[in-house]
Image (spheres, helix red, strand yellow):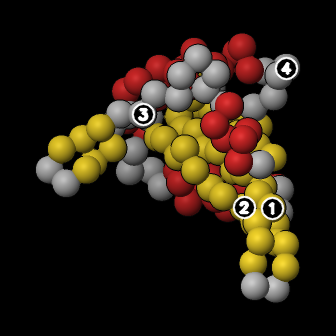
Amino acid sequence: MKLVRLTLANMNRYLAQILDLEREVTYPYGDKFFKIDHGKDYFAFFERLGKLYYYIFVDKHRVAGVVAAVLRTVPSRIGIKKIWYYCDLKIHPDYRGQHLPIKMAYKFIYEIC
């Protein structure tokens, strides 16, 4: 399995699978569940937060998981700080239980930070 950064050059190859995964994933809320729809421009919300690094875990040509890592500039008690905000983590049901979020985090830290 390979961790791939989504770019304009490869976006069309994976976007349909990313959107399918978004439609499939539900989030628990008490004893109920809800879904999130990011609208027509899936990445706009994350881009507003800071510098977006969007990664997908690809198994052959299949998207197994996704995560958005956003480099944000935020105020703190000791001045302006840059922090990573890790969000939009989704794992395809066929790949759950394989510890992909941990693998994604390790690869992200090793390759980016």
Q: Residue furthest bottom?
A: 78
First-in-chain label (1 vs 3): 3
Q: Amino acid at mark 2?
A: Trp
Q: Secondary structure at mark 4?
A: loop
Q: Secondary structure at mark 3?
A: loop
The residue at which mark 1 appears reads as 73
Query: Residue 109's quadrant in the figure?
Result: bottom right
Decide: few, some or many residues near mark 1? Use Cα within 10 Å; few <14, some 14-19, many ≥20.
Answer: some
Q: Measuring 68% from the left and 31% from the top, which residue is drawn there? A: 44
First-in-chain label (4 vs 3): 4
Q: Measuring 82% from the left and 72% from the top, which residue is drawn there? A: 81
Q: CA distance from mark 1 to mark 3?
A: 25 Å
Which image quarter holds the N terminus?
top right
Q: CA distance from mark 2 to mark 3?
A: 22 Å
Q: CA distance from mark 1 to mark 2?
A: 9 Å
The residue at which mark 3 appears reads as 36
Q: Amino acid at mark 4?
A: Ala
